[in-house]
Image (cartoon, coloured by chain):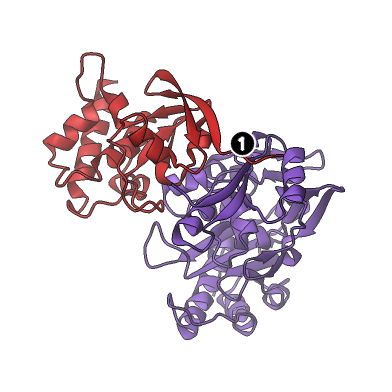
Chain colours: A purple, B red
Amino acid sequence: MYDIQHYYEAKSVEDAIRLRVEHPEAVIISGGSDILISIRSGDLAGCSLISIHGLDTLRGVSLDPDDTLRIGALTSFSHLMKDPLILEHIPVLAEAAGKVGGPQIRNIGTVGGNVCNGVTSADTASTLLAFDAEAELQGQKGKRRVPLTAFYKGPRRVDIEKDEIMTALLISSKAYKDYAGCYIKYAKRAAMDIATSGCSVNVKLTPGKDAIEYARVAFGVSGPVPIRISSAEEAVQGKPLTEETIELFAEHVRAGINPRTSWRASRDFRIQIQLEMARRCLRRSIERAGGEIVG
Amino acid sequence: MESISYKQITFTLNGKTVTTSVDVRLSLLEVLRDTFGMTSVKKGCEVGECGACTVIIDGETYDSCIYLAAWVDSKDVLTLEGLMDEEGKISDIQQAFIDEAAVQCGFCTPGFIMSSWKLLSTGKRYTRDEIRRELSGNMCRCTGYQNIIDAVEKVMNERLADN
């Protein structure tokens, strides 16, 4: 039996918002693969829960009229992995979702929870960040959108008001159209492990596929929250598809990352693998975008 | 709105509709074992790491230890007990686990069989690496996994040969 003080069950998004206002101390639970573990470990023992698990309207992926990809906050990792729209437009997000835990965890864990947790190691967060994703939040005053870069306030702190829940993650067509990406997770085990580091890169090549039109890179566990390295992105803009460009990219990544030493790995080790992850991710993204690296 | 302490839930358990009132603090694992006697569902790590409590809910595998019983209302649940046919015979998956000596202490076996049930239900052909990946949410501390993968591969080959 879980040590739960009060349990509230939302029947609709409006219901969830009302519950948030009435019970500001309560924790939102969607899948529970983090919350229930924290209750079991003692960290959240005795907490109250607002369950949004039953809000099936927040599950699934769709396209808004302007071709923005709308990923319901309650969409499970396993559904992301096989969703036709994700596989067509952002297959790298399916790749990242496939790195989470094991099959059972991917069936219960939700993409919204992965982001709202505010942890730097979240497997889908770096890819979402690298595609300029926005969080859609709904509260008493209606809906608002926040870019993920601003949504993360610090470790385990995200920009959710006391009356809000996350309803979706949005990626505009401009952000995903013609981009190809790659996510690499480094962990001690191939499954059921938390990322020691994660790197997500995506690129758009010039029409002739001989130079980088734009590249984007985000890291998990390079800082207290998932981060973008914009200097590396700008450095390779317009550059040819060469090993020299990849090294230039890595040099700028080196200046931008700031991992810490933890029991999982030291700072020095993380820096070393993150540079290599950046190189490999960029190479593979270029290949996946139809480019060929010369030199 | 008031908090709830108990919730009336109605769900399908191994093909039969069942109704019970559950304390909202209970996991599905506890309700399946203690209310319904489904003791194939093993209580292992209780934090969703070992997979010993794996059950099928609406066609997908879940660790029932980190699934609130209150959530199972109106869902379809399958446990190892539900794999038995009308004559009381075990399934081809269970038989293959016996034949391939994929069982030592047996504690992880029901969970492995439910994960195997799910992957075999797709009717697809998997490589050994893919089988490993599909079973990566289940841990076995005795067999070293080889015989488990042999057993799953055997059922897969038999079923694909039959079709």
Residue A126: quadrant of the picture = bottom right
The residue lying at 56 percent from left, 39 percent from top is B5
Relative to A189, say whether B33 is above or below. Answer: above
Q: Nearer the viewer, residue A222 or B87?
A: B87
Visible residue check, residue A94: no
Amino acid carrying label 1: it is: Gly
SS at mark 1 in the image: loop
| Spot occupied by residue A262 in the image (x, y as percentages of width and height) | 47, 79
Q: Is residue B104 left or right of residue B42?
A: left
Q: Position of residue A227 (x, y in %)?
A: 65, 71
Q: Which residue is mark 1?
A: A54
Q: Residue at x 17, y 53 (%)?
A: B142
The answer to whether residue B4 is visible is yes
User: Residue placed farthest to the top in the image?
Assistant: B87
Q: Which of the pair B68/A223 is nearer the observer?
A: B68
Relative depth, front residue between A140 and A104: A140
Residue A252 position (above or below residue A175):
below
Residue A45 horizontal/vertical position (percent) = 51, 58
From the viewer's perspective, is B87 left or right of A28? left
Residue located 43% across and 45% down the image: A104
In-image side of A269 versus A251 (left or right) = left
Q: Chain of mark 1?
A: A
